Amino acid sequence: MNPLLPFVLLGLGFGYADFEVSKFERLAAAEISSQLSGDERTVRVNAVSSGLALAWGELESAEIDARHFSLTQLPFFTEPWRSKAGKLGMLHIKLRDFKLRGLLINELRADIPNCRYDLGLARGLKQFRISKSGEGTGSVRVDEKALADYIVEKYAEVKSATVRVYNDVVWVEGYGEFLIVNTNFTVIAKLTPVDGTKLVLTDAKIYFDWVRAEPAAAKVILDLLNPVVDLYSGLGLYDAISVTDVRLRDGYVLASGKTRVPVKPGAPASR
């Protein structure tokens, strides 16, 4: 037996693994892109295999990087009824400059460990489906102009608005036609996470034409505006991120917390 044969076979094995990873990257990127809108959208998937461990479905990591698109819900979910034979050590998600249900999001990032996927489906039909998600960390960043546009689009009573974000305060000015009054208004408040999925104005000072609003009138405005953003039902992120911290700095709202790939709505029980 040629003493170099084992090394040749090993090299061929690694070459095959690289070929399979490249094919996986192309197919996964194309599948995700098909669920997004926008002529300028780009999607890249980069995967790192565990060498020959790819033969039994192990990937060290995969990164999904997409930008310049719009959508009404996340392009991927956990489908717990599927096989969990494939292993994915770490899933990195970077979604940038995209619009989700009317809100322009600068960046959504997540690093999620210990995921599983349907290996048979990936090999047979060349489709990548996550069947189990671990829990990681991540963040969502939105700039002040995008937040102002979202408020005007979301609330019919608010006819115009500008937002400034700095020093842990959000400052909303605009014109509104409310049940109680038609007026220029100003809201100066903190933005606080509630239940992990809602961003709510708290410790608010509210003015009508720069006269401090009476408590009853201020409550009407706050009840209308809150929650400013509902990540679960308003944006359709479900439990993809459970917000534990909100930072208001330099024109940006940065909400961070625990992340996971959410279970697909209406999914049957896992097996």
Image (spheres, rainbow, N blue to C red):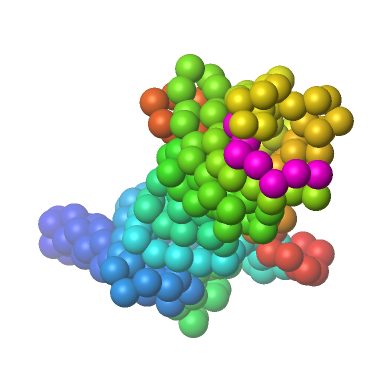
Q: Position of residue 204 (x, y in %)?
A: 69, 24
> Can residue 105 be seen in this snapshot?
yes
- Using the image, determine if residue 171 lies above or below residue 54: above
Please determine whether, in this image, residue 267 is positioned above or below residue 241: below
View extreme (bottom): residue: 125
| Viewer can see residue 58 | no
Left or right, 217 with respect to 38, comes to right
The residue shown at (55%, 36%) is 173
Magenta stretch, residue numbers = 180-186
The image shows residue 61, relative to residue 199, as above or below, that is below
Residue displayed at 43% across by 40% down: 143
Along the horizontal axis of the image, is 13 left or right of 88?
left
Q: Quadrant of residue 243?
A: top right
Q: Position of residue 109 (x, y in %)?
A: 45, 43
Residue 108 or 106: which is nearer the viewer? 106
The verdict on residue 110 being magenta is no
Q: Is 183 part of what is drawn in magenta?
A: yes
Q: Nearer the viewer, residue 43 or 248?
A: 248
Residue 263 in the figure: left or right of residue 93? right
- Residue at the image position 39 percent from the left and 26 percent from the top: 250
Q: Residue at x 62, y 31 (%)?
A: 209
Q: Where residue 202 sits in the image (x, y, percent)?
A: 71, 25
Marks counted in the figure total 0
Which image quarter is the N terminus in? bottom left
Q: Main secondary structure of the magenta part?
A: strand
